[in-house]
Image: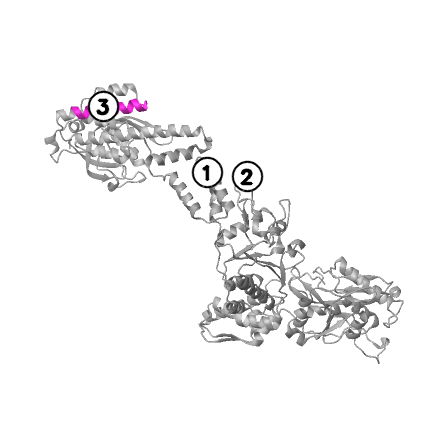
Amino acid sequence: MVNLPDFFNINNKEHEKASMKMQLPLLPLRDIVVFPHMIVPLFVGRSKSVNSLTSAMSRDKSVFLATQIKAGEESPEERDISRIGTVGKVLQLLRLPDGTVKALVEGKTRGRIATFFNDEEFYKVDVEPVSELEIDETESIVLCRALAEAFDDYANLTKNIPKDFEKKLSGITNPSQLADTVASHFSFKIEDKQHLLEMLSISERITFLLQLINMETEMFKADQRIKVRVKEQMEKTQKNYYLNEQMRAIKKEMGSEEDPGDEMKELEKRIKEKKMSKEAEEKVAHELKKLKMMTPMSAEATVVRNYIDWIISLPWFECSKVRSDIKEAEKILNEDHYGLEKPKERILEYLAVQTLVKKIKGPILCFVGPPGVGKTSLAKSISRATGRNFVRLSLGGVRDEAEIRGHRRTYIGAMPGKIIQSLKKSGVNNPVFCLDEVDKMSMDFRGDPSAALLEVLDPEQNNAFNDHYLDLDYDLSDILFVTTANTLPEIPLPLQDRMEIIRLPGYTEIEKYNIAKNFLLPKQIKTNGLEEMNVQFSKNSIYTIIRHYTREAGVRNLEREISSICRKIAREVLTDNNNASFRVTSSSIQKYLGPLQFRHGQVEEKDQVGLVTGLAWTQVGGELLYVETLVMPGKGEVTITGKLGDVMKESAQAAVSYVRSRAESLMIDVNFHKEVDLHIHIPEGAIPKDGPSAGITMCTSIVSALSRRPVHRDIAMTGEITLRGRVIPIGGLKEKLLAAHRGRIKKVLIPKENEKDLKEIPRSVLNEIEIVLVEHMDEVLFHALVKDEGETLSQKEDMPIPMLPESENVEQRMPLI
């Protein structure tokens, strides 16, 4: 080993000797390279590094400074340290309060690590000297002069090099020292600095250093040009866009940003190729002219660009080819839906006219019916049958008029309305457009969306629909609009007037059975992975599900129950490893679905006094509704309970008045209104009920209770009563008769004026129910009350009125009687 002074002054011959090594503490450096002749402060925090400095101070203050290859490595190994570094001397060591150390070190000469020792306390290395290659004197002078000139140019340009350093630099004649001193004052990349340190050829080192200095000079000039350009730009735009402009200028200087002119040419090409209305072409040309005059990064330019994009992305003349094969369309409709003859007939009529006329304004159909009867899926089938694209827009909860007509462009973030957005998505101007849940819209201070739909759904106006955002007329007349709703009264009358109302009242048991057999069962078996299993449902099992596990006009709950059975079968297959066939019967239904949920088709065992079966209409279809009346000693008070509305209470009062006026002919004590109290009750009291059509039902119940004459248990009735006993027509007859059919009622009394509505009733229902048309209350009592002429009133016993089962979901069924 040699001591430090000998190491610094070693010559080439001595360097060749393997014994010329010295052992020094190693100080790994992060993000810094120390050159010879460089004095630099270092902040040291790692324990091994602190110990290395402590060891150096205890000896001759010598330490080996080597840069880490990966700065993030906390405990570097030998492979993580650069082999060539600088032998340095610790000039000063200061311990800080936080445990770190500030060291002032001076680089002396280059060295190479010969052996690496990773001791527990600190790193040690055997360092061998490296010899620089000699340089020709003439070449040395030329390179030194070039280096000095390059450094002076940089210093004069940046104005941040101290004058005393420039004087110091002029006194250095050693080319190696000059190169190291200059390199130490530049913020080159760590890799470039380490490369300079490792270059032993002085001429190559100075040449590489000149390249780096020239690069720094050019970068500084470019930065100045960018700043000047940005400053000029800032005079025209807001200061908020400073960073964006600087980034754009940097990209432009680097040549990595596309020319905005190319983008503008592409936009012009799209506009030229797009076929639009004349008004739209003029508008786009005007907006494009404005866009060319704007700064690309300005906010207004973005707004104009988005507006142009919306116009040229709309399907102005692109359309689907409408299928004209009537037989094929009918086949598709029958494949997708069972029944629904009237909607199918209307669709086929439209296709027939379309084929003959070639151009017809799109019809606007409104499917009204309870949930689950297939309104939305029927709209999809229309799309498939006609060959058009399908677009669906849900209007449930929409309360802002701008959702339909869009926002004006004066607002930040303005967009077209949902109608225009949906057309852009469809890509054609003649889709089947389904406006779902049109009865669920509401209004507030932002406007009434149903009023905005008046223009959309009016065949005389929608050929020039004007969206607030586009401010252009757009032709909607080729669109086949289909709207869906659960209840018609919730739709404003002007909107109803613009649509062709098609009612989908609900399915009969036979229709539900066929839908389950042909559609729901195959679908759920496939969905639940049972296609390879032999899963069969008996006819009785399907009817059991329909009658005892669902109470609905549609088939949505029926599908859920079938899906539940399929899931349980799938679990049995995996649990028992049973791949045998499964047959679901009416007796095994309770195994999968639990106890029966509803009494269905079970009439009373006896004819009851004061208990009458009525018929009600609800949003989910028709329902059976029972009316009970009790007679008690009192003073003639009439109590009406069951959460009834005002109209229904008035019907009860009218019924009582009629009975009083006809008491003698009805074999009732004419003074009953003074001696007894009447309590009229309609069970399922949690459900709000209203409407006049329970008038004859309540009147029959009152007469039965006062005369002690039972009412036929298999008769149901509906109709409004007047004070003179006339029975006047009611609404919702189809739903009510379907409910009677589901409830196994044998005879139904309806107003004679409702005879015209019987043509809408399925033949299967009329074959099983006797329909009796009545005009007066006397006819109702004649059919409803049990005839037993040999029995007097005094011989009749008091017959208790049974409690009816509670509704399975009182919040969903709100009858309008």
Query: In x, y percent, where is residue 490?
Result: 66, 56
Give percent across and percent down for residue 809. Answer: 64, 62
Magenta: main secondary structure: helix
Distance from label 2 to label 1 (Cα)? 19 Å
- Secondary structure at numbered mark 1: helix
Residue picked out by circle 2: 410
Q: Is residue 525 magenta?
A: no
Disc number lying in front (2 or 3)? 2
Q: Nearer the viewer, residue 595 or 204?
A: 204
Residue 125 point in image, percent of width and height: 21, 36
Question: Residue 289 has which mark?
Answer: 1
Write the start and end of the magenta stretch as one range: 141-160
Q: Quadrant of the C terminus?
A: bottom right
Quarter holding residue 504: bottom right
Q: Amino acid at mark 3?
A: Ala
> Does residue 588 appear left or right of residue 169 in this picture?
right
Viewed as shown, does residue 406 lie left or right of 196? right
The disc at residue 148 is 3
Tell me which residue sits at (80%, 74%) in the image: 782
The kind of residue on which mark 2 rests is Thr
Q: Nearer the viewer, mark 3 or mark 1?
A: 1
Few, some or many residues within 10 Å of mark 2 (<14, 14–19, 20+) = few
Which of 251 and 307 lies nearest the eye of the viewer?
307
Sooner in the amino-acid sequence: mark 3 or mark 1: 3
User: From what the image shows, is residue 351 above or below residue 156?
Assistant: below
Distance, label 2 to label 3, CA atoms, is 62 Å
Q: Earlier in the sequence, mark 2 or mark 3?
A: 3
Please tell me which residue lies in front, 270 or 248: 270
Crowd band around label 1 with a 10 angstrom C-alpha radius: few (<14), some (14–19), many (20+): few
Q: Quadrant of residue 208?
A: top left
Mark 3 lies on a secondary structure that is: helix
Under mark 1, the amino acid is Lys
